[in-house]
Amino acid sequence: MIKYKHMTDNKLIKSAVFIKGAVHDTGLPIEKFPEVAFIGRSNVGKSSVINTLVSRNKLARSSSTPGFTAEANFYLINEEFYLVDLPGYGFARGSHAQRDKIARIIEWYFTSENTDTKKVVLIIDAKVGPTVDDLHFYKFLLENKKDVIIIANKFDKLKQSEVFKAMDVVQKAFEGREIIKYSAREKIGISELFEQIK
Ligand code: GDP
């Protein structure tokens, strides 16, 4: 493995290396590290959030990338933990078969005895608010006793006059959870998120 290949402006991230993608236990990386999983609706900006967090332009690939395959992608960060990028759910134009496949991968990842998820970062769209799919997967995560952090991405899209109401809706939907206001575009919330997962 290439160590410290990319140095970055985020001094907390010393290295970030793609290890492999998996869709079931046999595909999991051999070396074990604690895992932080990222989940969210397709197009919510999940790959942008991951890339801003680790200060890499193209580490995580957008679900809109041609040839993108739905997998749980494992990135080794600082040779300390895996950042696991799960496939985006709820793609409006996706076929039933594709939606089922994505739901199966997410369900497998969170229920497998061979994964070691310490935290889950659930990314929602601050402007759109929680969707039916967001709430479905949130409930599923709680049922599986996961430690969930909510990221309200695209916070920059909210007008000043909309912030209070929008955040109130989010807070009510995810009662008692920490909500981090985030903007991958404006680079807001990065240190707060890092603080939660480090
Ligand atoms: P993914 O499918 O969830 O990985 O989403 P992407 O990271 O590919 O982002 C989807 C779209 O949302 C792209 O056009 C991004 O430029 C845009 N986007 C991502 N994050 C933000 C953000 O914080 N603010 C705004 N305004 N747009 C964003």
Image (spheres, rainbow, N blue to C red):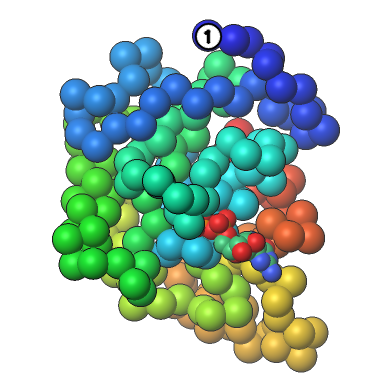
Give me the residue at 33% from left, 46% from top.
70
Q: Is residue 188 visible?
A: no
- Is 28 in front, or is 95? 95
Q: Determine the residue located farthest toward the right in the rendered image.
A: 9
Query: In the displayed structure, does residue 171 sit left or right of residue 139?
Result: right
Q: Read off the residue under disc 1.
A: 1
- Number of on-image labels: 1
How many residues crowd mark 1 within 10 Å: few (<14), some (14–19), many (20+)?
A: few
Q: Quadrant of the C terminus?
A: top right
Occupied quadrant, residue 84: top left
Q: Residue at x 44, y 42 (%)?
A: 85
Residue 161 in percent (x, y) is at 76, 90
Q: Is residue 155 above or below residue 20?
A: below
179, 184: nearer the viewer: 184
User: Can you tell me whether the CB of the residue at mark 1 lies under 8 Å from the nearest atom of ligand 1?
Assistant: no
Q: Classify residue 137 by image quadrant.
A: bottom left
Q: Is residue 145 left or right of residue 181?
A: left
Indicate the position of residue 82 as horizontal and vertical percent values: 47, 28
Q: Can you say whether 187 is above or below 78 in the image? A: below
Q: Quadrant of ligand 1?
A: bottom right
**Residue nearer the viewer, 106 or 146:** 106
Which residue sits at x=40%, y=36%? Answer: 73
Residue nearest the viewer, comparing 122 with 101: 101
Residue type for callout 1:
Met
